[in-house]
Amino acid sequence: MHIVVIGAGAVGSHLAERLSLEGQDVVVIEANPALAEEVQSNVDCMVITGNGASDSVLRDARIESAGLLIAVTSSDAVNVLACQAAARYGVPRKIARIEDPALRVGSGLAGVDVVIDPGESLAQELLRLVRKGGVSEIVEFAGGKLSLVGGFVAPGAPLDGLNLSGLRSSVEGWDWLVTALVRDGKTRVARGDTTVQAGDHVLLMAAGPTSEALRLMGVEEHAARKVIVLGATRSAALAARMMVDHGIQVTLIDRDEARCRVLAESDRDLVVICADPTDPRVLSTEGAESADAVLALTGWDEVNILGCLIGKALGAEMTAARFHRFEYVRLLPGVGIDAAVSSRLAAANAILRFVRRGHVHSVATFQDTSAEAIELEIDEGGAAAGKTISGMRLPRTVIVGGIVRGGDAFVPHGDTELQAGDRLIVFTLPEAIRSVERLFA
């Protein structure tokens, strides 16, 4: 597919890199010459320096042959104008990043097919994490009927050193499945002969309560009642507001006096402290030792890392950090940071389903692996209908983790027969994505 990406910031550059590695025909348009040069140096795609809403620039990007336009600059207006310009060239799908809620109503979005807000998606992810507690990530599929949860196996946990086939035969009422584990930066799709080790980042699919599965990993669930948020970014403010609305006590700390004043005046239920978010005395005074979670959501990775380390050292139950540079994530498990979040991934999850072939409902990507979890539906007359999972002869880097059939959700077995209308949650490594599309599209 020919894809035009407008904006080479954190979100645009990540999408361009991921899509170009898949073999998509990607053109990036960026108005800032320095950003454009950086993307050209790091990503195997065509880069044009210019205004993404300009007809002449869009023609240079071969907009008339594009199957998808993704406008993710920092300007809502530019993103909307770019989509409207692309509509005149007949681009079938146009996605715009829009943060201003006022622009999402009325006729101002003519020409925009899909609106994404990475900051809002990130805030919702953080809310799920703190309400679950203890897990490194949680992704819901099919309206919450199935959940993909992640955690790090603790030394001495029941799962440490166990073979998965032996584990499955010893557990009654099996309603969850280990789909993959990440070890030393390498992702392994789980098989019966897979042995789990302490420190592994395990991703498991559950069709019901996850408590027993997480207990085997040595992960303790604890819904947060008190949260400290470091930073006054838009994502931090959105997350804090969502948590307050769910009855969680939230204290937000940032050194920007003007920003703190705006937040304090706009949200009377939020405790706002103007101070250094990495000062141990400040965090101690605000009760980090009794906090269920410390969320470091500033715009600087280094500040977020330090804030989490200090929060954990003071006794916070769980810490989560927002990252721009993914390479940090692989270095951090077990050193004081329990979960990592990113607006880049939030955007990728919202957009990739429009790139995948077939009847795809959602896509989830992850911080420390390039794998994807794809929620797709088997259409009437599809090749997969009527076949068992084992009969599909799936690549070894693909696993079907869950099925939603009618109003029921369950974890399948090899002899489970697939039916038209089934919604499958398929976990796959990048090299098998094309195979998944061929088998299920």
Image (cartoon, rainbow, N blue to C red):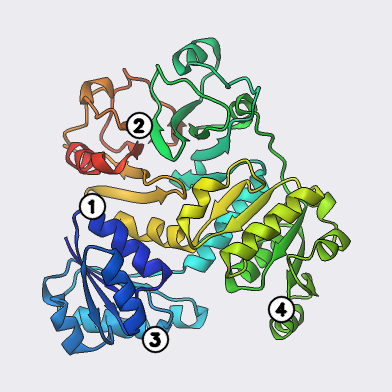
Q: How far apart are the two marked residues, 4 and 1, measured between alpha carbons?
A: 42 Å
**Residue pictured at 77% horizontal, 49% vertical:** 313
Q: Is residue 269 left or right of residue 329?
A: right
What kind of residue is marked 3?
Answer: Ala
Indicate the secondary structure of the residue bearing disc 3. helix
Q: How far apart are the two marked residues, 1 and 2, measured between alpha carbons?
A: 21 Å
Choose the circle earlier in sequence order: 2 or 4: 4
* Residue 354 visible (yes or no): no
Q: Name the one closer to the observer, 1 or 362.
A: 1
Q: Are discs 1 and 2 less than 8 Å apart at CB?
A: no
Q: Is residue 297 left or right of residue 107?
A: right
Percent position of residue 405, x then y: 38, 34
Q: How far apart are the two marked residues, 1 and 3, measured between alpha carbons?
A: 30 Å
For disc 1, the neighbor class at 10 Å (few under 14, some 14 to 19, many from 20) is: few
**Residue pictured at 27% horizontal, 20% vertical:** 390
Q: Quadrant of residue 271?
A: bottom right
Numbered tag placed on residue 77 in the rendering: 3
Q: Are discs 1 and 3 less than 8 Å apart at CB?
A: no
Q: Name the one closer to the observer, 244 or 296.
A: 296
Q: How far apart are the two marked residues, 4 and 3, measured between alpha carbons?
A: 25 Å
**To which residue does mark 4 refer?**
263
Choose the circle earlier in sequence order: 3 or 2: 3
What kind of residue is marked 1?
Answer: Glu
Choose the circle earlier in sequence order: 1 or 2: 1
**To which residue does mark 2 refer?**
400
What kind of residue is marked 4?
Answer: Leu
